Amino acid sequence: AQTVTQSQPEMSVQEAETVTLSCTYDTSESDYYLFWYKQPPSRQMILVIRQEAYKQQNATENRFSVNFQKAAKSFSLKISDSQLGDAAMYFCAYRSSQGAQKLVFGQGTRLTINP
Amino acid sequence: DVKVTQSSRYLVKRTGEKVFLECVQDMDHENMFWYRQDPGLGLRLIYFSYDVKMKEKGDIPEGYSVSREKKERFSLILESASTNQTSMYLCASSLGRTGVYGNQPQHFGDGTRLSIL
C-alpha cells in the first residue's frame, strides 16, 4: 500500500518570503499522480497544484511550484512571495494511475504567515 | 465551478444513535468519497463509490456504511455512533475513472464536524 509522509507538522514564514513544504511517498508503481491541497480555516479543501509522474517538468501555478524528485520519491511545495492568505493546512496526496481514484493523504503541515 | 454540499457543518449526537451525513454534488461526477480528518493523521478514506449503487471500502470502514441511490448523492451512515467517531468528515467527488481522467482533482465539501457525546 502507498503511504505519504509530511514530516513538518508546523511551519512559519515571514510575509513576502519563500517557504518549502516537504512530502515523501512510498510506492512500487511507476505511473501515478501527486497533488497538494490547501485547507484554510474556512475548512474547504482547495487544489493548489498537481503533478503527473510521467512528466519530468515540475508543475508551477503562479507563486506555487513543486520540486518533484521521482527517484527519491519526494514532492515538495515551494510558495514564493508568501501572503497572509496562504496561511492554512497543506496536504500532500498520492493517487495511483490504476483502478479507482482514491487519494492517499499525508498528515498535513500547518503553515503560519507572520506579518 | 463544482459544488459539493454537505448537509450539516456541525452535528452533535449521542452514543448509540444512528447518524446520517449527507453529501450532494452538482457536476454529474461518477466518483464520490467520504474521508475522516483527525489531527496528526491527515485524511483517511472511509468509503467511496464510482457509480450509483456501487460502493467500495476504504481504509477505515469499520462502524460505517454508505448509500448511493442517486448519482449526485452519497450518504455516510454511522450505524451506532461511538465517541471514537467524533471527528471531521469530508465528502469529495471527482470525474470518471482513472486513465482518461487520471489527473482530475477531487472536489471537497466544507466538512461536517461531528461530536458524539
Image (cartoon, coloured by chain):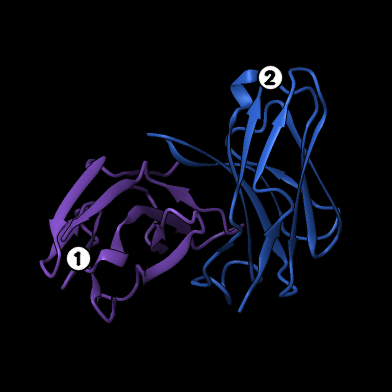
Chain colours: A purple, B blue
The residue positioned farthest toward the front in the image shown: A115
Question: Dividing the image into 4 quarters, which one contains the N terminus of chain B?
Answer: bottom right
Q: Are marks 2 and 1 in contact (CB under 8 Å)?
A: no
Q: Nearer the viewer, mark 2 or mark 1?
A: 2
Q: Is residue A60 above or below residue A25?
A: below
Tell me the chain of label 1.
A
Whether residue A49 is visible, yes or no, is: yes
Circle 1 is placed at which residue position? A78
Q: Quadrant of residue B10?
A: top right
**Which type of secondary structure does the marked residue at label 1 adopt?**
strand
Q: CA distance from mark 2 to mark 1?
A: 40 Å
Which dot marks residue B82?
2
Residue A19 placement (x, y as % from top left) = 15, 60
At 56% across and 53% down in the image, what residue appears?
A102
Q: Amino acid at mark 1?
A: Lys
Q: Quadrant of residue B94?
A: bottom right
Residue A66 placement (x, y as % from top left) = 24, 68
Residue nearer the viewer, A113 or A115: A115
Q: Residues within 10 Å of mark 1 (few under 14, many from 20)?
A: some
Q: Are marks 2 and 1 on the same chain?
A: no
Whether residue A23 is visible, yes or no, is: no
Residue nearer the viewer, A28 or B71: B71
At 51% across and 58% down in the image, what residue appears?
A44
Question: Dividing the image into 4 quarters, which one contains the C terminus of chain B?
Answer: top right
Tell me the chain of label 2.
B
**Which type of secondary structure does the marked residue at label 2 adopt?**
loop
Which dot marks residue B48?
none
Q: Amino acid at mark 2?
A: Ser
